[in-house]
Amino acid sequence: MQHIIEGFLSFQKEIFPQRKELFRSLASSQNPKALFISCSDSRLVPELVTQQEPGQLFVIRNAGNIVPSFGPEPGGVSATIEYAVVALGVTDIVICGHSNCGAMKAIASCQCLDPMPAVAHWLHYADAAKAVVEKKTWDSEIDKVNAMVEENVIAQLNNIKTHPSVAVGLRDNALRLHGWVYDIESGEIRTLDKNTKNFVSLADNPEVYFE
């Protein structure tokens, strides 16, 4: 914990004074253009990977970058999506998975999650991805996990379209959806191409989006 406190003290002493005008402008309002939904994994930091300043990304993080389908009892993810779209007026939503995802590894390997019942329940929102992956035979566990990561991004993109605010935004061409997979080792991102339904290099295809 001490290194976290020391980090704050360093921020307060060295970083904040240099960025005082930025934080002053953010003190009373925010105007992010994108909602970024990613895994809670400590190795993926959305603002670092995308080089965005404070105030530029509205972020949701949870185990497995999960987006439950809209239901009669909306939870925190649903409420945050609605706020981002309706109140903040974001124009883009990114759902970003990543390599070596522990949540997807647990699903792919049928890991016993009895000691973590809340996690087990949460990961059922990735059942659609699991069903697709289980229909195929994989040469290795790594290949299976990689497939789970990609299929889960696709599944969550389909889930988010059930949210009324998102559906309206898509209908009005006021919103775009992006499906990304971040590779921790290489720093590369692959994006889901709406035409081919394949993941392609974002660096080579910056114009590609899902919907």
Image (cartoon, rainbow, N blue to C red):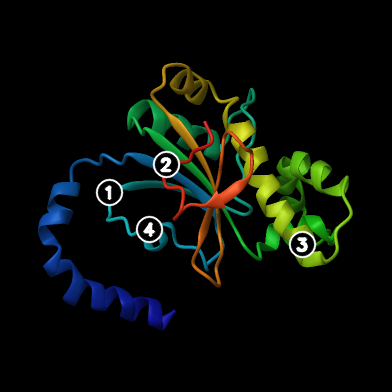
Contact, CB < 8 Å: mark 1 with mark 4? Answer: no
Q: How busy is the neighbourhood of tag 1: few (under 14 within 10 Å), some, or many (20 plus)?
A: some
Amino acid bearing label 1: Gly
Which tag, 4 or 3, sits closer to the chain's start? Answer: 4
In-image side of 61 versus 145 (left or right)? left
In-image side of 136 versus 188 (left or right)? right
Contact, CB < 8 Å: mark 4 with mark 3? Answer: no
Q: CA distance from mark 4 to mark 3?
A: 28 Å
- Numbered disc 3: secondary structure: helix
Q: CA distance from mark 3 to mark 1?
A: 37 Å
* Residue at mark 4: 47
Q: How busy is the neighbourhood of tag 4: few (under 14 within 10 Å), some, or many (20 plus)?
A: some
Q: x, y percentage for residue 211?
A: 52, 30
Any mark on residue 143, and which? 3
* Residue at mark 1: 55
Amino acid bearing label 3: Asp
Note whether 120 is above or below 100 in the view shown. Answer: above
Amino acid bearing label 2: Glu
